[in-house]
Image (cartoon, helix red, strand yellow):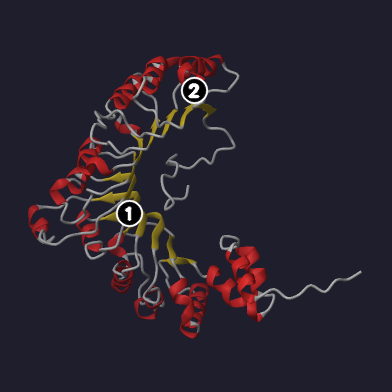
């Protein structure tokens, strides 16, 4: 027996579609149901745009058709533009070509990319990446100008740059100098050259740069990274309000200097020292620290170093989450009992909700069980979680760095 259901109000249907904001397949199906469902579905479908740019020829037939189609669509349906909040631009390079640049000869005048980029006036999250470590200055002037226009938009709050080579950190400092609402910056697989005294005078020390809250530095190669980001250049990048910080495989021994620059604003911190080894580091100024994650490679004194770091945290503290990942033979790890005593001592870390320990061993392995035995105090309090590292269920990426904020996707 068929039953005729009364039609739902369009406002209720729109609300249901809103819950599908991250399900593109369902949104596409909704958009095809009827005209009344199209508008809401389209707003979510266009919330995130990903542009794939082939190099050295920007104007390949396939790319030109896609860029032209999107440009005409945005010109026709201008109401879509305010709903485009995330923009990813990926430059697919055929090979490094530092001498002649990334653009094929004669293609500059036919570029649709600059016009398309300047159309996005309400972008909040902006990501620029390449499949190779491409030279930033090899991009055409019109493209660089369009990127600068996007970054200057008042709506921009987060920018991520991946796999780029800059002549100096002056370029990045200048790029974000007028991004006053920028709150998050991520650099990954990035090379930054040094700046001489004459170039440093051109950085307008009297101007104020963005006041960052989120900073991620993954595989950043810069001889004077600590100098650039610390107090010496706060006029270009204010780090006194950093809440979340991740540092992985930096060649510069800058972590302690940066922590002192952040002061007491830091809430979440993830460190993977990598090839530079265990640097001297203190968290004595991090009175607001809520989450600490340490990812450690082969080093005989790893747990001794961890104990020193934990001891430096001001107490009584508000620390809620601790994660220690050790990609080391468990037989070489000594010192779990000391870590247990630090984290369970009376009145020190009463706010703790979880201590996660990643061990490079199978759960049935005797060394795995010894970790649990060494952390018996945390186990009795119901705070301990010990898990196996490098299993197939884990997503293995080159940096092995878990996300620390909603900005990052790993």
Residue at image mark 1: 185
Residue at 23%, 65% in the rendered image: 178
Residue at image mark 2: 381
Determine the secondary structure under disc 2: loop
Image vertical order of residue 291 relative to residue 341, above or below: below
> Which of 133 and 206 lies nearest the eye of the viewer?
206
Residue at 28%, 45% in the rendered image: 221
> Which of 19 and 165 lies nearest the eye of the viewer?
19
> Which of 379 and 94 lies nearest the eye of the viewer?
379
Dot 2, crowdedness within 10 Å: few (<14), some or many (≥20)? few
Residue lying farthest to the right in this orientation: 1
Residue 347 x, y percent position in the rendering = 35, 24
Please indicate, yes or no, whether residue 100 appears anywhere in the rendered image. Answer: no
Determine the secondary structure under disc 1: strand
Please indicate, yes or no, whether residue 185 appears anywhere in the rendered image. Answer: yes
Image vertical order of residue 388 relative to residue 144, above or below: above
- The N terminus, quarter of image: bottom right
Relative to 21, is 357 on the left or the right?
A: left
């Amino acid at each position: 027996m068929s039953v005729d259901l009364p039609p739902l109000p369009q406002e209720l249907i729109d609300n249901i579609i809103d819950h599908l904001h991250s399900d593109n397949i369902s949104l596409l199906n909704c958009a095809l149901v009827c005209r009344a469902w199209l508008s809401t579905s389209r707003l979510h479908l266009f919330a995130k745009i990903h542009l794939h740019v082939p190099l050295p020829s920007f104007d390949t037939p396939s790319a030109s058709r896609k860029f032209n189609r999107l440009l005409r669509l945005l010109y026709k349906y201008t109401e879509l533009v305010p709903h485009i909040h995330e923009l990813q631009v990926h430059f697919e390079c055929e090979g490094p070509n530092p001498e002649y640049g990334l653009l094929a000869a004669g293609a500059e005048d036919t570029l649709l990319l600059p016009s398309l980029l300047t159309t996005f006036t309400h972008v909040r999250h902006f990501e620029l990446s390449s499949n190779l470590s491409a030279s930033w200055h090899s991009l055409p002037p019109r493209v660089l100008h369009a990127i600068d226009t996007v970054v200057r938009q008042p709506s921009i709050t987060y920018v991520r740059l991946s796999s780029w080579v800059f002549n100096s950190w002056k370029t990045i400092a200048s790029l974000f100098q007028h991004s006053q609402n920028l709150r998050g910056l991520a650099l990954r697989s990035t090379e930054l050259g040094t700046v001489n005294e004459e170039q440093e005078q051109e950085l307008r020390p009297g101007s104020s740069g963005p006041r960052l809250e989120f900073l991620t530095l993954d595989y950043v190669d810069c001889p004077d990274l600590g100098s650039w980001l610390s107090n010496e250049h706060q006029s270009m990048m204010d780090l006194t309000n950093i809440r979340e910080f991740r540092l992985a495989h930096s060649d510069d021994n800058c972590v302690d200097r940066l922590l002192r620059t952040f002061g007491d604003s830091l809430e979440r911190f993830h460190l993977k020292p990598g090839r530079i080894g265990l640097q001297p580091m203190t968290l004595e100024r991090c009175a607001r620290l809520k989450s600490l994650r340490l990812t450690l490679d082969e080093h005989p004194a790893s747990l001794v170093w961890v104990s020193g770091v934990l001891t430096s945290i001001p107490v009584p503290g508000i620390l809620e989450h601790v994660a220690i990942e050790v990609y080391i033979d468990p037989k070489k790890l000594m010192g779990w009992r000391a870590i247990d005593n630090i984290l369970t001592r009376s009145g020190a870390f009463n706010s703790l909700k979880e201590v996660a320990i990643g061990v490079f061993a199978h759960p049935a392995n005797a060394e795995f069980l010894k970790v649990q035995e060494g952390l018996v105090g945390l186990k009795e309090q119901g705070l301990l979680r010990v898990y196996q590292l490098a299993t197939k269920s884990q997503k293995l990426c080159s940096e092995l760095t878990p996300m620390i904020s909603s900005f990052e996707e790993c």
